[in-house]
Amino acid sequence: MTTKKSILFRAVRILVITAVAFAVIVVVQLHRQKAAREVVPSAHVVELAEDANLDDLLTGTPLVLVSYGGEACGHCRALKPNLHRLADALPGTMRVVLVDTDTHRALARESGVEAIPDTRLYVGGKSTDRRLGYQDDNALKEWLRPHIAAAAFIHTDDHHGHGHEHH
């Protein structure tokens, strides 16, 4: 009988240890997911103020990413931390501008925004590409990779005096 009790005790002990380990893993995963959703403000992200003009923000860096969205939009809220991380990864190359479509209804209408999030890439002040819907970090990087490489090349040439003819 003692061996049956001993085996049963060991089995229960293993189950308890496994359950605790599983609970720890779940808590860690939930914490990581929450941290990924939290917005760590970036100095390279500008939220368009009510009285601001978007055109004024489309120059000054080689690339400008404008994301039209709103606080009531779950996909927009999920996209926001990704945009902040992207802007921090590319200081001096890219600025990110967040446009709240509730605050800037006329601008959104004039810009042809029909669904949010609507993220647009501006090069030299002109819209060159756009993505609709949520984009994770990898999707954003893949989308922007050729533009970032071109901007870095142009930016480097400008600083070294190459790429322009002087007469």
Image: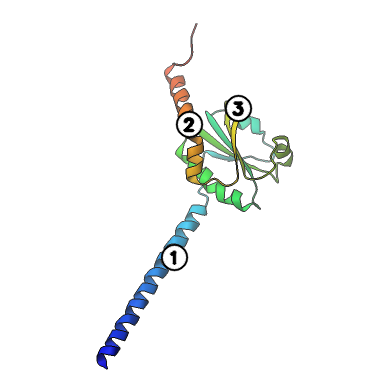
In the image, 96 versus 42, the foreground residue is 96
Q: Report the Cα–Cα distance between label 2 and label 1.
A: 38 Å
Indicate the quadrant containing the N terminus: top left, top right, bottom left or bottom right: bottom left
Q: Residues within 10 Å of mark 3 (few under 14, many from 20)?
A: some
Residue 87 visible to an observer of this rendering? no
Q: Is residue 6 above or below residue 15?
A: below
What kind of residue is marked 3? Gly
CA distance for labels 1 and 3: 45 Å
| Residues at marks 2 and 1 touching, judged by CB atoms closer than 8 Å | no
Label 2 environment density (alpha carbons within 10 Å; few <14, some 14–19, many ≥20): few
Q: Residue at x 48, y 31 (%)?
A: 146
Q: Where does label 3 land, which residue? A: 125
Q: Looking at the image, which residue sits at the far left?
A: 3
109 or 84, which lies in front? 109
User: Badge 1 local density, few (<14 within 10 Å), some, or many (20+)?
Assistant: few
**Residue found 55% across the figure and 28% down from its top:** 60
- In the picture provided, is 17 more to the left or to the right than 135? left
Give how far across and how far down residue 162 sits, in percent: 44, 16
Mark toward the start of the polypeptide (2 vs 1): 1
Residue at screen point 40% across, 67% down = 24
Can you identify the residue that label 2 sits on?
A: 146
